[in-house]
Amino acid sequence: MVPATAQGVQPLHAVYHRSSIPVLRAALASGGYRLRDTLGALRIREVGADEWSRADPTGRFAVNVNRPADLDRGGRRPGGNPAYSPAEFGFRKEGHEDG
């Protein structure tokens, strides 16, 4: 099951059956490191917002965050709400202790 958003499928948030392992290993062995490219060789079921929004109504699971600066790009949450804050993703300022 692969969640699908307006930005496309989200293969890193998918659930794969163990029968997918040989296909995934073959892709890696041939230099295929983009999981999205390998989906075509698998039998998948896309899960749309009508299903996944029950677990995550904001769609926050699909926000691509690699570093705190990614949160400061002026991006908007689904529904037009303000951008995410670094604290929402567990980032904290250097030198500050939790708790």
Image (spheres, rainbow, N blue to C red):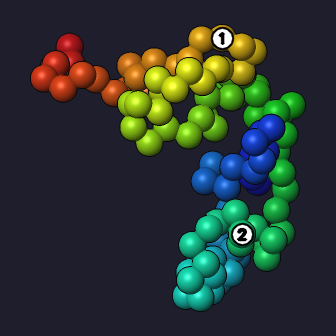
Which residue lies at the image location 68% right of the left edge and 81% below the top edge? Answer: 23
In the figure, is residue 72 to the left or right of 15? left
Whether residue 10 is visible here, answered yes or no, is: yes
Q: Which residue is mark 2?
A: 37
Say which of 67 and 18 sits in front. 67
Residue at 60% x, 11% y: name it.
82
Q: Is residue 15 visible?
A: no
Name the residue located 64 percent from the left edge and 20 percent from the top edge: 76
Say above or below: 88 vs 9: above
Q: CA distance from mark 2 to mark 1?
A: 32 Å
Check the picture and name the quadrant holding the C terminus. Answer: top left
Q: Residue at x 21, y 19 (%)?
A: 98
Residue that mark 1 sits on: 81
Mark 2 Cα within 10 Å, few/some/many (few <14, many 20+)?
few
C-beta proximity under 8 Å, tags 2 and 1: no
* Residue reaching furthest to the front: 73
Q: Where is residue 92 shown, x and y percent of the image? A: 28, 23
